[in-house]
Image: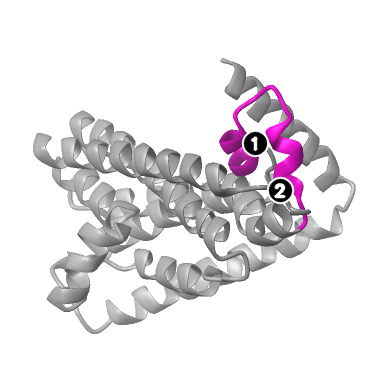
Amino acid sequence: MKPLRLLAAGFSMSLRRSLAFRVNLGFDVLLAFTGLGTAIAAVLIVFTRADTLAGWSKAEFLVLIGTYQLITGLRTTFIDPNLSWFPESGIRNGKLDGYLLQPASSLFLSSLSQSSPLQLIQVVLGVAVLGWGIGVADRPPSAGGVAAWLVLVMAGVVVTWALSVLLACLAFWAPKLQLDVFYHSAWQLGRYPTDVFARPLRVLLTYVFPMALIASVPSTALLHDAQLPTILAGVAAAAGTGALAFLTWQAGLRRYTGATS
C-alpha cells in the first residue's frame, strides 16, 4: 500500500500546484479537444466514402480512438511528467541522487512521483468517445468483452510505463541521447488499427514495439469478445516488459555514479 499512498500524495501536491495556474486548464482543455477532434474528423470523413477500413467499422474506429485517448491521458498525467525529462533532470542535473536517498523505490519515485492532473481531461474525453463508439455499434459489448477490455487496458498501461522506463534508462549509458521525438511519433501510430499497416510494420508494432496492445487489441476485445489466449498474451506482455524495465533500471543504477562524478 505504500506506493499507492505515495502516488496519492504526489497527485494531491501536483493538483494544488496545477490549480495555482488556472489559465493552463483552459489551454489544456482546448488542446485536448483540438487533438481529439482532428482524429475523429478524419475518421468521419473516411466513413462518408466507405463502410469499413481495413475491416474496421466506424463504431470500431471510435472505440479504438476512445481507448487510445484514455491510455494517452493516463500516460501524460502520470508517466510523462517524470520520465520525459529524466535524462536531463534525473541524470545530468542530479535529481536521481535525491531519490536514491529516500526510503522508497527509486524506480517508483523517478517514474510516478509527480503528475499532471489537468491532463485527466484526455481520459474524460476518451471515455466519452468510447461511449459514442459503443452506442453506434451493431450490438452492445458483453460482460466478457468488457472484462477483457479492462484487463487489456491495464496491460497496455503497464506496457506504456515499461516502455517509458526503458527509454529513460538509456540515459544511464548515453546521457545526451534524446529519443523522445521518436517515441512520441511512434506513439501516434497507436491511434490506428494495426491492420491498416503493411505486414512488416504490423509485426514490428505487435511483437517488437507493442503499440497494438495500447488500443487495437483492447478495442477488438471489447466488441468481439477476446479469446483467452489473447488476454493471456496481453498479461504476459505486461509482465515481460515490466520485468525488463525493472532489470534494466537496476543495471543502470549499478552503472550510475552520481551527477557530480
User: At which x and y percent is residue 180?
Assistant: 54, 68
Q: What type of secondary structure mainly makes up the magenta span?
A: helix
Asked whether 102 falls inside the magenta stretch, the response is: yes
Q: What residue type is labelled 2?
A: Gly
Which element carries disc 1, helix, strand or loop?
A: helix
Relative to 146, residue 259 above or below: below
Tell me which amino acid carries mark 1.
Leu
Residue at the far front: name it.
261
- Which of discs 1 and 2 lies nearer the camera? The answer is 2
Which of the pair 243/188 is nearer the observer? 243
Q: Nearer the viewer, residue 53 or 164?
A: 164
Secondary structure under the numbered disc 2 in the rendered image: loop
Residue under pointer 1: 109
Indicate left or right for 119 with 211 as reference: right
Look at the image and tell me in which quarter the N terminus lies: top right
* Numbered mark located on residue 258 in the image: 2
- Measured from the top left, where is residue 101 in percent x and y? 73, 30
Colour logic = one colour
* Residue count near mark 2 (Cα–Cα under 10 Å), binned few <14, some 14–19, many ≥20: some
Coordinates of residue 144 in the picture (x, y in percent): 19, 30
Upstream in sequence: badge 1 or badge 2: 1
Residue range in magenta is 93-112
